[in-house]
Image: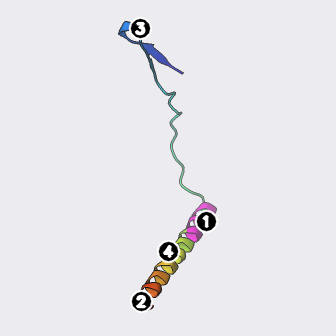
Amino acid sequence: MPYTTEEGGRLNNFASEPKVYKAEPPSRSQQRTYLILGAAALVLVGGLIAIAVYASSVS
């Protein structure tokens, strides 16, 4: 771990920085997976909202 010595003998530690790289766009299979997961999340949230509305209207 890289460190420097400051005045008075104090050590100052620095985290090692990760290597920077350019992100690649998702492949077709990754895009399809994201679409399926997004649709599943939408159905789940919609279902939870529907249950909450139904439960709050039942007396």
Residue situated in front as seen by the camera: 36 or 23:
36
- Tell me which numbered mark, 3 or 4, is placed earlier along the sequence: 3
Residue that numbered label 4 is attached to? 45
Question: Residue 36 placed where, x, y %?
Answer: 59, 70
Residue that numbered label 3 is attached to? 9
- Residue at (58% x, 68% y) in the render: 37
Residue furthest left as drawn? 7
Q: Quadrant of the C terminus?
A: bottom left
Please indicate whether residue 59 sits to the left or right of residue 37 in the image: left
Question: Residue 48 placed where, x, y %?
Answer: 50, 77
The region drawn magenta spans: 29-37
Real-space Cα separation, disc 1 to disc 4, in angstroms: 18 Å
Q: Relative to 50, does residue 9 appear above or below in the rendering? A: above
Q: Secondary structure at mark 4?
A: helix
Q: Nearer the viewer, mark 1 or mark 3?
A: 3
Disc 3 residue type (three-letter): Gly
Q: Are marks 4 and 2 in contact (CB under 8 Å)?
A: no
Question: Residue 56 placed where, x, y %?
Answer: 42, 85
- Residue at (37% x, 7% y) in the render: 8
- Tell me which numbered mark, 4 or 2, is placed earlier along the sequence: 4
Real-space Cα separation, disc 2 to disc 1, in angstroms: 36 Å
Q: Are marks 1 and 3 in contact (CB under 8 Å)?
A: no
Q: Are marks 3 and 4 in contact (CB under 8 Å)?
A: no
Residue that numbered label 2 is attached to? 57
Q: Nearer the viewer, mark 3 or mark 4?
A: 3
Residue situated in front as seen by the camera: 42 or 31:
42
